[in-house]
Every structure is written in C-alpha cells, then in structure tokens.
Image: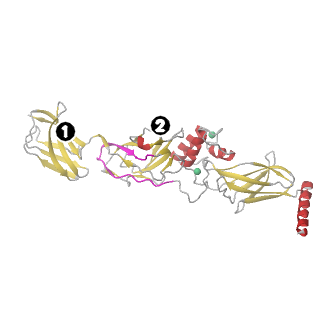
Amino acid sequence: MKNLRNLWQLILSATLVFTFNSSFAQNSMNGIVIYLNAEQTPLANVDVLLLDMEGELLQTTSSNETGNFSFTGLEAGTYKVTAQSDQEPLPFIDLLDVSLLIDYLNNQVNFTSVQEMLANVNGISEVDEADLNFLLENWYLNGENFPVGNWIFEEKTVFVGGKDGQTTITGGCVGDVSSDYEPDKSSSNPIADFNVVDIYPNSTIELAVITDYAQIVKNFFIEIDFDPFLLNELILESPLPGLKYTIENNLIRIIWADINGKGLALCDLDNLITFKLSSGNITNINPDNFGLTENCSFVNGENQFANDIALKFAEPVVTSKPNHGFDIYPIPLSANPTFQYELPYEGNVNIEFINTYGQTANRIFPGQSIKGYNQFSSHDLDLASGYYIAMLRLNGQLIGSKKVIVR
Ligand SMILES: [Ca+2]
Ligand SMILES: [Ca+2]
C-alpha cells in the first residue's frame, strides 16, 4: 500500500512538472465527438480542428471509431476546438423536429446552444418562425436539403496545461433538433390506406379525405403518389389554417403544423383535405392510382408519432356531370320510351322526371345495371304534357341528365 501511495505521489509530481514546464509543449488535449442525443452517440471519422484564440488553424485530426481524438505537443494555453464533417447528412429530420421547434417558438421548451444551432435551419439570424417555414417548405415540400441536414458542431474553448485539456464536441445535422440518432428508427408510421372509391370517367370530382381520429394532432405530412395522366387539373383545399402543399409530377406533398403548438382533433373537421380532380378515363380511385406513400406521418399531442390514425375517402361529390351516354327516345317522349346509358361500374339505377316546378313528376326503375352499355324500355310512363328533366341516378348519385318534352 505504501508503494502505491508513492506511485500516486510520483504521478502527481509528474503532473505538476507538466504544468510548470508547459512551455516545452508537452501538453495534450483529449476529447470525444458526439451526436446531440440522449445516448450521446460517438461520431467516428469526423475532422477535428484545433485553432488558436484568433481562429487560426493549428492542427487537424480525425475522431476514431469510438469518437475520440487527441492533439499532442501543445504549449499551455487556451485553444478553440471544433469539428466538421462532409459525411452524408443523417435522415433524421422528421415531424418531431417540427413539433419541438414549434414548442420552442411558443416558449414551451428551452434549447441548448447546440440545439439552437441545429434549429437555425435557414442559417439566417436567430431561431424564429422563418426557420419553421424553411423546414416545412424546403425540407418537406420541395425536398431541398440545403442547408438542412448539413453537419454542424459546436466550438469549445479549452485550456491546455496541467490537468485540463479534456473536451467534448457536440454536433448534429441542421434541422434535427430532436436529435434522434437512431438508425433503426423510422420517421414514418403506418396509416390505413385509402379505400377504393368509384368515380365517373371524364367528370370533375370532389373527393374529401376524412378521419375519425379523436386524438390531438399537432402536425402531419401526407405524401400521395398519383397517376398524372388520369388525374389532371388537381386542386387541393383544406379547412386547416396554414396547410401547405405542392403538386409536382406524380407526387402531392401536404404538410400542416399548428403554429400555436396546440394541435386539434382531426375528427372535428368535416374534411381534412378535399381534392378536386378531373377523373380522366378512370372509374375508381384506388391505392394504385392515388395512394399514400410510406413517408406519411402524424404527430400527436405528446410529440410522438401517431401510429393508430386512419384516413379514408368520403363519398365523392360529382361537381360536373357527364352524361354517360344517357339518351332517351323517342323525343317527344312516348308512353313507352327507351333509355340508354353507359355506367362506369355496376349499380342500381333509377330515372327521375322533374317538372318545371322542380317537383318529381314520376320515376322509373331500371334497377341493377351492368358496367358499360345498358338499354331499358319502359311501359306506361305516365307524364302530363310539358317539359321535364330526366335525371339518371346510379346508387342514388346523379350522373346524367337530359331535357325531354311530352306532347
Ligand atoms: Ca433563422
Ligand atoms: Ca429529428
């Protein structure tokens, strides 16, 4: 035990000698480079820069596989240390960063100095709403990754000499404010896909996305892959304030974040989003021609991904009515007219006669009809002389109309 104490005294005096003889440039500095996350994940192969207090570069080295680095042969004094990396940005920017940034802007959370650097995604002035918009528009909608995703590291001032010379350099990728460096963590979450909806070819359809999700949602990103040849003239509307979207090529990207950080229960909305689209030649909308991609995600009131949300289409509303080959003869109408129509899909058909007072004067019921061409002859159609509009309904939905006269 006595020998051990002597050994410690020897080490202690050696340290003192180091301190007193610091002008011999015997000092070293050790450190580690870590990612800003709860696990403080070490970052390997990062360039570490040693600077003097004027910012002059003195030495560079690389962090090893455990994130450690060292500089040796240093004179005692105060240095600046920072790091840089040209490695690929990490794909960890997601809606949790958006939530955290909104909470920060609403004074709900504090940021560390490194988080403030990461949150300043536009690189201009301080962290403010412009950074949030930059993240929403440039990152989510336009997919631009500059400067979002670039590596950034703090700069430490370190005294070298004596027992000092130890430091930790923390860094991250710009925008990853929530700093979730977890390679196996997915930023997307499963959402039940859209159901198939029958629509009418060559018509204008209003198609609403609805949800009965009753939890608070603070922000979401929806990406829809669609067939541009089938669904031209696409317009998007939403009651959600501040909703942003882009429609490009065959991709619709929609992002919404409640700037107040409170969020809302989406089930309270009649429609989450309404698509007004021209249906082209298609007869239904299904996940193959209008499907959610795996990039969709929703964040709930606890700043966690909502994995249990489901979206679906409401019944489509036909805003302009193609006539579907709807024809009646003879005209003037006889008591035994023949009706022709082409259906986009099979269903139950009825034809309603509306008089000039807007009243239903009569109905006939061709009933279950096949997809495609149909012909139906009626007997003993009882209508007084006058003008009528014959309205063709498929499963209750108006899909065609024709003016007729009875003499
Ligand atoms: Ca800024
Ligand atoms: Ca993140």
Asked if labels 1 and 2 touch by Cβ distance under 8 angstroms, the answer is no
Q: Amino acid at mark 1?
A: Lys
In the rendered structure, the answer to whether residue 226 lies left or right of residue 28 reads left
Is 46 covered by the magenta stretch? Answer: no
- From the viewer's side, name the closer residue of 128 and 276: 128
Residue located 45% across and 43% down the image: 265
Q: Which residues are magenta?
A: 188-214
Residue 4 image point, x, y percent:
88, 68
Tell me the quarter of the image containing the C terminus.
top left
Callout 1 crowding tier (Cα within 10 Å): few <14, some 14–19, many ≥20 = some
The percent coordinates of residue 306 (x first, y second) are: 49, 51
**131 above or below 33?**
above
- Mark 2 CB within 8 Å of ligand 1: no
Q: Nearer the viewer, mark 2 or mark 1?
A: 2
* Residue type, numbered disc 2: Pro
Q: Main secondary structure of the magenta part?
A: loop
Question: Quick check: is 191 in the magenta stretch?
Answer: yes
Mark 2 packing: few (<14 Cα in 10 Å), some, or many (20+)?
Answer: few
Residue at the spot of label 2: 241
Quickly name the residue at label 1: 402
Q: Is residue 118 visible?
A: yes
Please tell me which residue lies in front, 106 or 198: 106
Residue 228 appears in the picture as rendered: no
Q: Residue furthest top?
A: 357
| Residue at the farthest front position | 1
